[in-house]
Image (spheres, helix red, strand yellow):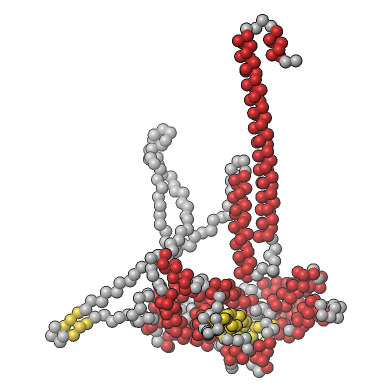
Amino acid sequence: MNPLDDLARTDIDPALLAQVRALVEQQQADLVQRDVALARRDALLAEKEFKITALTHELACYRRIRFGKASEALVGEQRLLFEETVDMDLAAIEEELEGQAPTKRKRKRAGRQTLPPELPRIEHRHEPASCQCGQCGADLVKIGEDVSEQLDVEPARFFVHRHIRPQYACRPCETVTAAPIPAAIIDGGMAAVGLLAWIAACKYLDHLPLYRIEQIAARQGVPLARSTLAEWIGRIGVALQPLADRLAELLRQQACLHADETPVRQLDPGSGKTRHAYLWAYRSGVHDAGPPIVVFDYQTSRAGAHARAFLHGWRGHLMVDDYVGYKALFTDGPTELACLAHIRRKFFDVHAASGSPVAEEALRRIAALYAIEQHGAGLDPPQRLALRQRLAEPSLRELHAWLLATQRNVAIGSSTAKAIDHALKRWPALARYAESGSLPIDNNPIENAIRPIAIGKKNWLFTGSERAGRRAAAIQSLFATAKLNGLDPLRWLTSVLERLPTCPNSQLDTLLPFPNSTQS
């Protein structure tokens, strides 16, 4: 029964009844609108809840990928690029979650890294609008400071050095005197040493083609023609070649070396095509005394004769992969060392493809050998030798016996059998590192030195000529050695280009990229 109908049967004033009816109808309409609004809100909350749940699952997945056990499917720079992408995606997902949350969440932040103290500081003071208290009007008293720092950058800044040389004349003898022109890498050139070093670093450290360097300068209003940049690079290469040659001489004085090679493309003039060339890389032993050295040797082929020519007359231990081009070296000369990382990689590929328990056991045994090396990382050679004799040699003998026994039980020609055969074929060279405290266990140090070159090839695509390849190898050798020795390659090169024109040959070693070299 409708209460309004009952009320209409009474003697109530019709006008009042109309007001009551209108009020009830309005309340009913309000209730309908509220129900609709609540339904919309519930649908929106359900949608947000669904999106938050999806983002939370996605975030957990990305965190598991980013911080879980790293896969060997991605190595070196590939893994770094992958991790950069995941980090960006993690930040984006967290930002989306922040926007979906009904209330503002307090963001968890890791401890902020300390900015280098040697960087110049520009102070910005933020004072209150008034020195009186906003509550009672009393004068404010300083009780401390809240200091925060932000890192900023200024793009390449071009400026001009004006060299003014007053001319003085002697009237009686009619002579003119002026200060001598400072010696320079490029006589009469407009490029200062800082600009030359910056161009070389852009090209050989950051792997920027000259046309991109030209565009960077143009954005600052500085016209630098590519032909001019190319001329400067050519002259810099000639000036630095003696340093690269001296670096190679010092490298060949080491008792242990790493060697590897990577293909590059070289333009074939007249055909409009490119052909294969190779950058041969050599590095001083990772456990040797003295500053580490990296030397790149550009050659037009992968023939083993190039390695024999570079190491002609050298006697020592040479760590290489199983490339046949090195084999002739070991018949009368260096002693061969084999890379345990290459052996491990073959078993890893088998395990990743099939989950082989044999490969898994091999990986476990190899991991034990690397754990011993990690334990001896901070020891001197005699201490490391004692550790290897006590722990590594027994483990190597057990691994060798296990490989021989397992070889008889696996299918001939299978991927597992091939991995075992490869390890046994390389065994004398593989186990040789344990006989000394200064020999390396693998060839990873030289692979790490080559990796920036492999990434850079994606930018510069090919070398324009054999001469250009040799010039690049020389400059890359100096830059790579500088980085290994903890030097800033750009600062080092700026100092060298400044001092090189007046440096006598007897003091050439003071310009090499070693920590004890004198740098202005």
Judge whether 510 appears above or below 69 on screen: below
Location of residue 70 by image quarter: bottom right
Q: Quadrant of the N terminus?
A: top right
Q: Nearer the viewer, residue 520 or 424?
A: 424
Q: Residue at x 68, y 87 (%)?
A: 324
Report x, y in % for residue 153: 45, 61
Location of residue 459 by image quarter: bottom right
Judge whether 504 appears above or below 46 on screen: below
Report x, y in % for residue 237: 46, 82
Q: Residue at x 21, y 78 (%)?
A: 167
Q: Residue at x 57, y 81 (%)?
A: 274
Location of residue 122 by image quarter: bottom left
Report x, y in % for residue 297: 56, 84
The answer to whether residue 175 is left or right of residue 278 is: left
Report x, y in % for residue 207: 52, 72
Q: Quadrant of the C terminus?
A: bottom left
Q: Residue at x 68, y 89 (%)?
A: 327
